Every structure is written in structure tokens, then in C-alpha cells.
Image (cartoon, grey):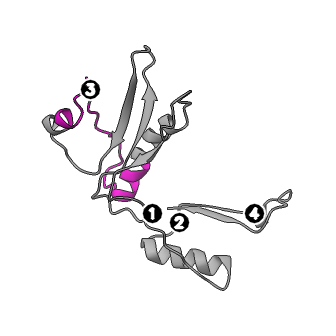
Amino acid sequence: MIDTGENPRSAAPEWHPGGHGLHGHFAVGRFVKRSLVESAWPHGFVHIKLLGNLPAGSDVVEESRVASRYLAKYVGKSLGPTGGLHRYEVAQGFEPVKVRLFGRSPEAALDAACELFGRPYRHVWRSSDEREWSGPPALWAAW
């Protein structure tokens, strides 16, 4: 997904620990008036939390990391019997776009991804670095 930081991000549902129902956690990339959220969610209490603690000069990539870490806590929790509910949703019209990159080597493809993102990768994992790896060659990177 190529994320400009300007669009609504995503949502993750969670059963309230007190047992009184399902609630949602949403992350958005801009200010939204509380009255708008309350009118869109007429099912009860609305709590808005600014995801802060960002280093000075943080860009949209770092903001996205903070929001992703916040939502990941809830995506990883069990919903139990949900009757077909999805565990994670993306706002309609903001679905991730698939981008295919090709290179003559894994490093060339990684270089193409860095060029696309406009920055070097922050973390990388290569299956070739794992002695016990028995699967196909794999490379994972995060920006």
C-alpha cells in the first residue's frame, strides 16, 4: 500500500472488556470534528485519542507507524464467535493499491522499492541469512 498520510486509515473491532458490546478503534490521517464522529456512530460513547509521542520532525511514514502499532494491538486480539465479522477493515475507497516491482535480483527489486518510497528501508530480513531456512528465497523490508 502506498500511503500519503492524507486518507482515513483503517479500523479494528474489539469486544469491550466489561462485556457490554463491540467497539471499534479507528485511525485517520487528519483532524475530524468530534460532532461528525458522533453523528456517524450513534451507538454510544465516542472517545477520541491523539496518537502522539512522535519525535520532532516526524513525517507521514512515522505517523503511520505509530497508528499501525496502535491498531495492531486490536487486530491481534481474538473476537471469539463473531458471525462472520471481519477482524480488520479499510475505509471504502481507500483500499490498498497493489504495486508490482521487478528486478534482476532481490537487491535490485529492493532498490526499486526504495526509489518508489523515496527513502531507504528501515529494516530488512533475508531468508539467505537464515541457516535453517528451507523455504523459497524470501525478502521482507519495512520503511
Q: Which of pointers 3 and 2 lies earlier in the amino acid sequence? A: 3
- Would you say 3 lies left or right of 84 here? left
Q: How far across and down, in percent of the image, does residue 19 sit?
A: 44, 15
Q: Which mark is residue 99?
A: none
Marks 3 and 2 in Cβ contact (< 8 Å) = no
Task: Say what amino acid the circle numbered 1 marks.
Answer: Met
How far is the residue under mark 3 from the one under mark 4?
47 Å
Q: How far across and down, in percent of the image, does residue 78 sit?
A: 56, 30
- Residue visible at 68% across and 81% down? 105
Q: Is residue 38 magenta?
A: yes
How far is the residue under mark 2 from the one under mark 1?
15 Å
Position above or below: 84 against 46: below
Query: Which quadrant is the N terminus positioned in?
Result: bottom left
Q: Residues within 10 Å of mark 2 (few under 14, many from 20)?
A: some
How far is the residue under mark 3 from the one under mark 2?
42 Å
Q: Which residues are magenta?
A: 37-66
Residue at the disc numbered 3: 43
Task: Say what amino acid the circle numbered 3 marks.
Answer: His
Task: Say what amino acid the circle numbered 4 marks.
Answer: Ser
Q: Regarding mark 4 in the picture, which secondary structure is present there?
A: helix
| Closer to the eye: label 2 or 1 | 1
Question: Relative to the observer, which residue lies in front, 45 or 115?
Answer: 45
Quarter location, residue 103? bottom right
Q: Which of pointers 3 and 1 lies earlier in the amino acid sequence? A: 1
Q: Which mark is residue 121?
A: 2
